[in-house]
Amino acid sequence: MHLMTVQWLAVLALVFSALGCSTSSEDASSSDPDTNYSNRWASGSTTSAPGRPIGLLIEPGPAADIGYRIGWATPIELLPGQEILSTTVLDDIILVIEGPENIVTSLRADNGELNWKIKLGSRLETLYAPSRDGEQLFIHSGSRFFTVRDRDGEVQAVAKLETSVGSAAVYDPLTRLAILSGSNGLVFAHSVDSNFARWRYDMDGRITNPPAITQQDVFIVDTGGTYAMLEAATGQPLWRNRTLGGVNAAPTVQGSEIIVASRDGKLYAINRTTGQDTWQYLDAEQPLIAKPIALGRLIVQPLLPDGGLVAVNAIDGKEVWRSAISATPVFTREQDMLLFNTGGLVAVDLDSGETVTQSKTKALQDVIPVGDDGSILLVSPNGRLLRLKPL
């Protein structure tokens, strides 16, 4: 009996010891930011037994059906309560911004490997999509402007913005100015060299969308439908006009025109030199609240909130086709247009809008062109990224 008691005590000691080690390991993992922010899947295997799923956002077979092969897969391992605010491809890097903790992750675009990960700003700030100029990254919140070194994530400068902003900046590399729009209607140019405002211009109403850069000029539209073209270097107004209804969507540049979708149900093509309408599309039969997308010879307008798309000719605004499909266009290929929705990738014929191919994926948040070889980046809501390369 004595021997058995000793043996049971030894077993219990081993159990408690194992439990203690496990608890310590979990505590260390939850408290060590390097562990929490690790990129463990970056070098993990994505292979499995033949015929079995390998856990990617899209499997090789469906990817091939729509004209792609697997490039690389890696996750941004989101901490509890975090969500992806933006994913931006900037030449050879991919920058992912998470909130509300404002974690910025830099990945190599060619293989998905982690460059660096930093926490920027406070939880009370929202970070917007970044810009890049050479070795500098520019990221701003609603109140502050951060200059970050691209190779290692070192913060080089922090500046207070002229006024509170609620949308991403557009960056003009010729003047080294970031053009921002305040929710109070103030448009201003923030110099990335001096970290002060270079010029200011007042619109009539609130501004909720970023401006659009067109060569040496900047186009801005407020929620009331007033729009203006300003010199990017000086803020000097070139012309000013308005739509018949309010505007919720960001403008789109298409050649010599600026395309504006209005709540009055019209799509306006505005000549960027004169400010006059080149054409208007009048047959949407509903308020237009989504950003129009310029894809070569077509302007594609999502019809929200009910879904569907209408494609018009970029030259004269005549309707080319209308589709009931609810999806976001990515780009055009030789004969078709690639789109995505939460459940997959879709290719539609450019001339008719008819569906050519559909490939099911896991849940998608975004699909972004990457590189100059026709590759795309799939982004899931839970932080998984997958690069697809054309066959």
Image (cartoon, helix red, strand yellow):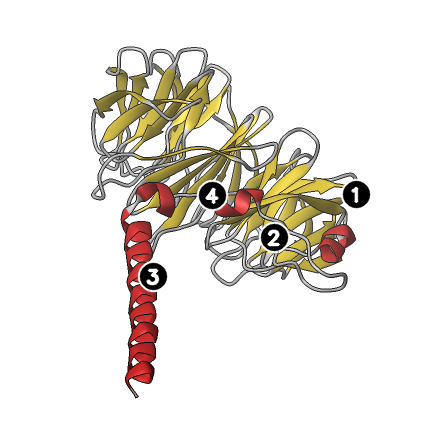
Q: Is residue 136 above or below residue 66?
A: above
Give the spatial CA distance, label 2 vs label 4: 26 Å
Residue beneath disc 4: 39
Q: How many marks?
A: 4
Residue beneath disc 3: 22
Give the spatial CA distance, label 1 vs label 4: 38 Å
- Residue 293 lies, in percent from the top left, at 57, 41
| Quadrant holding the N terminus | bottom left
Amino acid, disc 1: Gln
Q: Residues within 10 Å of mark 3 (few under 14, many from 20)?
A: few
For marks 1 and 4, give the one nearer the viewer. Answer: 4
- Residue 296 lies, in percent from the top left, at 67, 34
Q: Earlier in the sequence, mark 3 or mark 2?
A: 3
- Image side of residue 44 versus residue 167, left or right: right
Q: What kind of element bears circle 3? A: helix
Q: Is residue 124 above or below residue 358?
A: above
Q: Earlier in the sequence, mark 3 or mark 4?
A: 3
For marks 2 and 1, give the one nearer the viewer. Answer: 2
For marks 2 and 4, give the one nearer the viewer. Answer: 4
For marks 1 and 3, give the one nearer the viewer. Answer: 3
Give the spatial CA distance, label 3 vs label 4: 22 Å
Q: Is residue 53 above or below residue 218?
A: below
Amino acid, disc 2: Phe
Please tell me which residue is depicted at 24% across the width and 40% down the height of the picture.
Answer: 125
Amino acid, disc 4: Asn
Q: Earlier in the sequence, mark 1 or mark 3?
A: 3
